[in-house]
Image: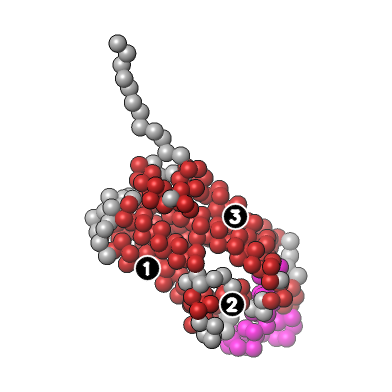
């Protein structure tokens, strides 16, 4: 008589990355057992690079308008001479070749920093609520969540920028507001309110929903903390975007 043996199936990082888009409950159940994130990292980076190059002409045109606006509105620039302002505008209008390399490096930093912060905040919620997750699982889940919230967002923004054309974007704020979200529901909003609303777009809302699902499925947190901390992340992200845009007037 042969001996019956059984092994627990290993988690598939590729399947988990796909499931995060189409079957998130299955993805978070898999991450609870096997916290994998390699495929999600690769896919997110590829989409971010594609989006970067698609949006680059619009971003450069918008940056030129943003800097011109900042010269006129931000006291930080009042002590600059006309020659200094001219040189700054020239660098924005004709960026050096190494700037693309720096931009690509920044994509990697943004992805990891955002994922790390998301995991740390949710780890705090998990600890307060006595959940079942640890940092490894929440980081893996956060990296998989970054696939739609950063990767798909980047490539979607790039496509929109190409469709509308670089000249459509007078300032960087115009680039931020073009993704469908709350900003479209308040077309009359201006200034910081408009920028804040622009930060609550469909991909940010998608990410908030996925964070809630991760807390409930992977961490086993069923109380109000399962949605309170993800909601905080959503609002904090929009607030940080607003604060950063305020530097340019």
Q: Residue 157: image x %, image y %?
A: 60, 65
User: In the drawing, what numbered circle is on residue 37?
Assistant: none
Marks counted in the figure total 3
Q: Residue 144: image x %, image y %?
A: 46, 52
Looking at the image, residue 87 sits to the left or right of residue 189; the answer is right
Looking at the image, residue 102 sits to the left or right of residue 111; the answer is right
Distance between the alpha carbons at the discs numbered 3 and 2: 22 Å
Which residue is painted at 59% across and 55% down in the image?
47
Kindly give the residue lying farthest to the top in the view shown.
Answer: 1
User: In the drawing, what numbered circle is on residue 231?
Assistant: 1
Q: Which of the two labelled residues, at mark 3 and mark 1, occupies the earlier sequence position?
A: 3
- Identify which residue, 111 or 173, lies in the foreground: 173
Q: Which of the two labelled residues, at mark 2 and mark 1, occupies the earlier sequence position?
A: 2
Give the magenta range.
Answer: 57-86
Q: Which of the two labelled residues, at mark 3 and mark 2, occupies the earlier sequence position?
A: 3
User: In the drawing, what numbered circle is on residue 47?
Assistant: 3
Pointer 2: what residue? 173
Asked whether residue 60 appears in the rendered view, the answer is no
């Amino acid at each position: 008589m042969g001996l019956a043996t059984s092994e627990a199936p290993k988690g598939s990082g590729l399947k988990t990355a796909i499931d995060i888009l189409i079957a998130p409950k299955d993805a978070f159940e898999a991450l609870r057992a096997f916290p994998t994130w390699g495929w999600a990292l690769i896919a997110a980076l590829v989409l971010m690079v594609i989006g970067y190059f698609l949006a680059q002409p619009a971003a450069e045109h918008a940056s030129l308008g943003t800097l011109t606006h900042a010269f006129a509105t931000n006291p930080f620039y009042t002590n600059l001479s006309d020659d200094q302002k001219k040189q700054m505008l020239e660098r924005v209008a004709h960026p050096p070749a190494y700037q693309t390399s720096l931009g690509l490096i920044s994509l990697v930093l943004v992805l990891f920093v955002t994922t790390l912060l998301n995991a740390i905040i949710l780890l705090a919620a998990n600890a307060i609520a006595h959940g079942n997750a640890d940092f490894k699982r929440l980081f893996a889940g956060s990296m998989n969540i970054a696939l739609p919230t950063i990767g798909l967002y980047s490539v979607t923004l790039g496509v929109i920028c190409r469709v509308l054309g670089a000249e459509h974007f007078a300032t960087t704020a115009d680039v931020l507001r073009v993704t469908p979200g709350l900003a479209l529901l308040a077309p009359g909003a201006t200034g910081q309110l408009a920028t804040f609303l622009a930060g609550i777009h469909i991909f940010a809302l998608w990410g908030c929903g996925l964070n809630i699902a991760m807390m409930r499925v992977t961490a086993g947190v069923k109380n109000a903390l399962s949605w309170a901390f993800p909601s905080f992340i959503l609002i904090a992200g929009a607030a940080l975007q607003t604060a950063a845009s305020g530097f340019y007037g």
